[in-house]
Amino acid sequence: MISSEEMTIFIEELYSLIQDYKRCDDTNLKKQIHDEILVLSDIIDPNTSII
């Protein structure tokens, strides 16, 4: 189980990645960002999908 401090860091990073995803015009990079979002969202809550 992750600590509350780690959870805070993961959520902040997730927010940042979502912002990057929205601004990104490069298809390959956008796919990589999407994959990172999925990994982090699974760490935060394995029972919920963000995207």
Image: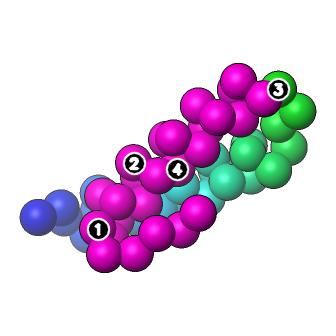
**Which amino acid type corresponds to the residue marked 3 in the rendered image?**
Asp
Q: Is residue 38 visible?
A: yes
Instruction: For the N terminus, give its image quadrant.
Output: bottom left
> In the rendered structure, are the residues bearing label 2 and label 4 in contact, judged by CB atoms less than 8 Å apart?
yes
**Residue at the spot x=82%, y=26% of the render?**
26
The reply to whether callout 2 and callout 1 are in contact (CB within 8 Å) is no
- Judge whether residue 13 can be spotted in this image: no
* Mark drawn on residue 39: 2
Mark 2 or 1, nearer chain start: 2
Estimate the spatial distance between the alpha carbons at disc 1 and disc 4, rounded to whole Å.
13 Å
Residue 41: where, in percent of width, then height?
Answer: 42, 60
Q: Which residue is mark 3?
A: 26
Marks 3 and 4, Cα distance to the nearest angstrom? 16 Å
Which of the two discs, 1 and 4, labels the residue nearer the N terminus? 4
**On the picture, is 19 further left or further right than 40?**
right
- For the point 64% across and 34% down, the residue is 31
Q: Amino acid at mark 1?
A: Pro
The amino acid type found where label 2 is placed reads: Val
Label 1 element class:
loop
Mark 4, residue position: 37
Is the residue 37 above or below the residue 47 in the image? above
Query: Is 20 positioned to the left or the right of 24 in the image?
Result: left
Segment tinted magenta in the rendering: 27-51
Mark 1 highlights which residue? Answer: 46
